[in-house]
Image (tube, rainbow, N blue to C red):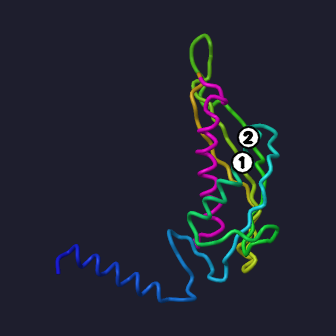
Amino acid sequence: MNKNNFIKYLFLLSTLVLSGCAGVKFTFSGVNIDPNIKTFSIEPYTNEAGDGPATMAFQFTDDFTQYILRNTSLLPAEQGQKGDIEFSGAITGYRVTPVSPGGGETQQTQQQRLTITVKTNFINNYDDEKSFDQGFSFFYDFSGNQTVQQVETEAIDVIFEQIIYDTFQKALADW
């Protein structure tokens, strides 16, 4: 048996063995979901920051929902029902700050930073010790020659991607 066939055989064998382990917690990339947990619910996030695009909270809620659907076998809870795990929260911070001052007569900022903070309340209805209420922040740096409106779409996508990842890891990873 050559090396490639051996690797394929080993992969197939491990897949068959693991698929026969009913009732065992599923672990993938550090994610550890109790087999009793089948559903999730996400209450629409709100924008309490007062700044940013009007659709920002809707985008966060939708992106977070899609992330869970792509990365777990969990199903959304029925309309109006709470899931086995629940997420809710708000965008609590949206601010632009200078990162590095420029030189010369104009003193224009060479780089700016957009920072967004999202507070999440997570409830695990099977293990209350894993529940939390925590803020997550991330930032996006951009040129001082640009306005936040010029980079806002890309910046929000990058920031939300990281905040969603961090929130997901906090809620479902077993470190």
The residue indicated by pointer 1 is: 117
Q: Residue at x 23, y 77 (%)?
A: 5
Q: Quadrant of the N terminus?
A: bottom left
The residue indicated by pointer 2 is: 94
| Predominant secondary structure, magenta span | helix
Q: Residue at x 66, y 57 (%)?
A: 64
Residue 120 position within the rendered picture, expressed as x and y whole percent measured from the top left: 74, 59
Say which element carries label 1.
Answer: strand
The reply, left or right, for residue 9 in relation to residue 107 is left
Residue 102 position within the rendered picture, expressed as x and y whole percent measured from the top left: 58, 21
**Circle number at residue 60:** none
Few, some or many C-alpha atoms within 10 Å of disc 1 (few <14, some 14-19, many ≥20)? Answer: many
* Membership of 166 in magenta stretch: yes
The reply, left or right, for residue 32 in relation to residue 29 is right
The reply, left or right, for residue 67 in relation to residue 82 is left
Rendered image quadrant of residue 8? bottom left
Asked whether 171 or 14 is in front, the reply is 14
From what the image shows, is residue 73 above or below residue 96? below
The disc, 2 or 1, on the residue closer to the chain's N-terminal end is 2
Few, some or many C-alpha atoms within 10 Å of disc 2 (few <14, some 14-19, many ≥20)? Answer: some
* Membership of 71 in magenta stretch: no
Check contact, mark 2 vs mark 1: CB within 8 A: yes
Residue 54 position within the rendered picture, expressed as x and y whole percent measured from the top left: 77, 40
For the record, the magenta segment spans 146-175
The reply, left or right, for residue 19 in relation to residue 85 is left
Asked whether 129 or 39 is in front, the reply is 39
Q: Quadrant of the C terminus?
A: bottom right
From what the image shows, is residue 145 above or below residue 77? above
Callout 1 amino acid? Thr
Label 2 – label 1 distance at C-alpha: 7 Å
Callout 2 amino acid? Tyr
